[in-house]
Image (tube, rainbow, N blue to C red):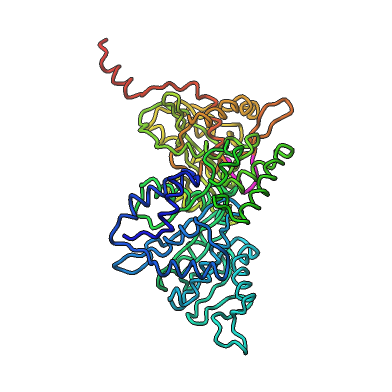
Amino acid sequence: MKIPKYVTDYIEKYKSGNVIFNKERVRLVSFLEDNILQRDDLYFDDKKIEDYIKFSEKWFFKLQDFQKFISCFVFLYEKDTKTPYFSEFFISMARGGGKNGYISTLAAFFMTPLHGIPKYNMSVVANSEKQALVSFREIYEMIESNNLYITGERPNNPFYLSKVYVEGTDTKSQFLFDTSNEKTKDGAREGCIFFDEVHAYEKDTIINIKRSGLGKVAHPRTFYIGTDGYVREGFLDRLKERANNVLKGINPEDRLFPFICKIDDKEEIDKPELWEKANPMFENPESEYGAQLFKEVHQQYLGLQFNPSNRPEFMTKRMNMPETDTQSVVAPWDDIMATNRPIPPLENNECIGGLDYASLKDFAAVGLLFRSGDDYIWKTHSFARKEFLDKYKLKPPIHEWEKKGLLTIVDEPTINPKHIIDWFIEAQKNYGLQKVVADNFRMDLLRPLFEDAGIEYEVIKNTRAIQSLLAPRVEDMFAQHHLIFGDNPLMRWYTQNVAVKIRKDGNKEYEKKEPIRRKTDGFQALIHALYRADDLKDSNLEEEINLLRGLRF
């Protein structure tokens, strides 16, 4: 394979130390060298690469080295099919990294005969019309300011302008702006879709709807662009996980090209010489725009000592590394994600049950707490009322989680307590259930059912006192990565929804960030079980039974 100089030069700049890469870009280089750049069944279209660069620099702006590098892989093709190898691109970097300008150049180029595909329609999708208009206006204004649009005096010009779309007159390719309101969308006949501000997508509904129209036009492509944000367990987190699987070689056949720029560690916020990890506009040689942007970002950084409350926003948007206020959350997101480890075999192990059944009309949660050395394993399940879900239309993918077996949706006036009891009865068959711990809410309904089933239970009468007692331990368990949930996005969502309130006496309480749509039931059930966590021995009942069988009386 003949490799373009824009690829080899950029990689050499990294290897020689002239630019500093974050670990994701280091892995990207390794992935490309191991899986892509040595292949004989692929080729770079050098003419399209050069045409694109010349077009962009003539009509828009001088491209930076990283933009040329990415673009080469936009025009990487399979020899057999003559189709693009990478069909999806994930471009994530700090604010000001030139993401919108870059997709403007691509979209404009795709409309021209230089790209050469007729009716290669495109749209840019964002959460708001204002954001979706950014790239559209950039292309519109470039065409308008250079008099490249058709008029009576210039009937042969290459572009046609309207208020809602731009069209390449030769290819009849259109570029439109769109919003992420899935109610009014369907899969159109498009060749390329740009999803902007992907950090704000809580669900992937609109993405699936829009992408359903791809494949009807040659060379379909999808671009996901944005800086990180505050939505957790949304589309972006799943996309980052997918990208990491590519970069780690877990899914090398995935046709996703991930170009991710961020600092590697939160302490690097105090090292401006490393900020280029998050924003490649700061790489050498620095453009006039990059130099001015760096001054602006540095000034914002200096202001943090007087306004420390701005730090989470600065970390998220300028360093592309979300940072939560540790005083108001159970744990930082990375520590919550660390619960995603495989659950070991637990049959016959003793456990403590936890229950949250405070509301009969929305959610209820049950779970089993196990101990393994210093680790505690939490196996949980939830019940949710269909009417509640239909009414409030929660943003997380509840129905997707139901398919994964994480919860059961019940179509009932209230959540029948029998669901709770039946779950624990079934648990008793497989595990050494010592007791179930719950608060006093609705226990008048549950007491007789627990007693009939022969399940021991304990009622917590002062929930706030228990939360204050357990808060330091919970904080330490997350920080030391001693909690295991398995791959349970529902439990991670519950945990993320908890607001930590510090009382005047310094004690902590767990509340909801929002009373209706941000559920915390699974976390509260965990707290109840943790109240008796010290009763758990690090042992296996089957081993104890075998020991007894071996004794002679």
In the image, is 448 to the left or to the right of 517?
left
Q: Residue 257 vs residue 262: left or right?
A: left
Main SS, magenta region, reads loop
Classify residue 88 by image quadrant: bottom left
Residue 27, horizontal then vertical, whole percent: 41, 46
- Which image quadrant: the C terminus? top left
In the image, residue 204 lies in the stretch drawn in magenta: no
Name the residue rendered at 50%, 74% in the picture.
Answer: 111
Foreground: 48 or 439? 48
Q: The N terminus appears in which quarter of the rendering?
A: bottom left
**x and y percent of residue 55 in the render?**
51, 70
40 to 522, vertically: above or below: below
439 lies above or below 550: below
Is residue 515 a member of the stretch shown in magenta? yes
Relative to 154, is 325 above or below?
above
Instruction: State which region is magenta.
Output: 512-521
Q: Which is more toward the observer, 537 or 148?
A: 148
